[in-house]
Amino acid sequence: MKTIGIIGAGNIGKTVATHLLKNGFSVLISNSKDPESLNETILSLGKGAKAVTAIEAASADMVVLALPWSQVPTLTKITDWTGRIIIDATNHFKPDFQVEDLAGRASSEVVQDYLPGAKLVKAFNTLFFKVLEQNPVTENGHRVLFMSGDDTQAKVQVSEVIEAIGFAPVDLGSLAVGSKLQQAKGLLSTLNLVKF
Ligand SMILES: NC(=O)c1ccc[n+]([C@@H]2O[C@H](COP(=O)([O-])OP(=O)(O)OC[C@H]3O[C@@H](n4cnc5c(N)ncnc54)[C@H](OP(=O)(O)O)[C@@H]3O)[C@@H](O)[C@H]2O)c1
């Protein structure tokens, strides 16, 4: 799986794209506008990056969600999500930066509802992008990326990508348990660990 779709071309979308490109992946990256609006972004990302519509990015076999929480519902109808591996990097902040009241559910369980049939893995959401963008290989260790999800095979594939770009995946279990730990305001949110 060498081509990865990214929905959202801001701080997190560009940071994840940079790590992927550095390690031989291709990316299809999108925002809410025409692909031409990403010309400068594509120039700075370099070889292997292509600007596409969100619909095209969503058609990759593995897709990273790097858009604002409030925009997740817009994704439901843009493709058939069945069987697609989705890496959910969103945090459930409202535009006023308060977290949304999810009535006790994990944020990725809510995202899963918007993407019926998708195999959702929560990852890339815990670290501030300025930390995430740093070299994941540090002092001979590998920076930890937490992940959680209900589909074991999808987690294996996502952990392979995480390892391929130099991070150390740590599986926190199901969405109901793990996503709650790693999501915004969760116990492991913002924790920057290095695995030796
Ligand atoms: N920033 C961080 O350090 C950080 C860390 C962890 C997790 N996160 C989470 O990651 C997500 C993205 O954060 P960010 O900081 O990267 O935000 P950002 O810099 O504001 O970028 C958001 C991107 O999403 C695009 N977008 C908005 N609505 C869209 C839609 N309907 N379809 C496709 N693309 C759309 C925007 O495109 P336009 O320019 O066209 O609007 C923009 O490229 C959020 O859920 C955030 O909570 C952020």
Image: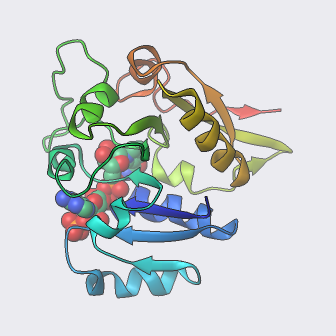
Camera-nearest residue between 183 and 54? 54
Left or right? Give the position of 116 relative to 45: left
Q: Is residue 163 above or below residue 102?
A: below
Q: How many marks?
A: 0
Look at the image and name its color scheme: rainbow
**In this view, 6 is above or below 146:** below
Image coordinates of residue 41 in percent, x first then y, are: 41, 80
> Who's the residue at 38% across and 16% down the image?
176
Q: Residue visible at 44% across and 40% down?
A: 125
Measured as percent of width and height from the top left, residue 148 is found at 50, 27
**Quadrant of residue 115 within the rendered picture:** top left
Residue 10 seen in the figure: no
Q: Nearer the viewer, residue 151 or 74?
A: 151
What x and y, as percent, mark residue 9? Answer: 36, 66
Q: Position of residue 190 (x, y in %)?
A: 48, 33
164 left or right of 90 in image: right
Ligand 1 is located in which of the four quadrants? Answer: bottom left
Query: Horizontally, is 162 left or right of 138 in the view?
Result: left
Above or below 22: residue 111: above
Query: Quarter holding the N terminus?
Result: bottom right
Nearest the viewer among 49 and 11 is 49
Q: Would residue 170 be visible to someone looking at this image? A: yes
* Residue for point 51% across, 78% down: 49
Residue at x 64% of width, y 28% of height: 170
Seen as rendered, the residue at the extreme right is 140
**Quarter placement of the C terminus:** top right
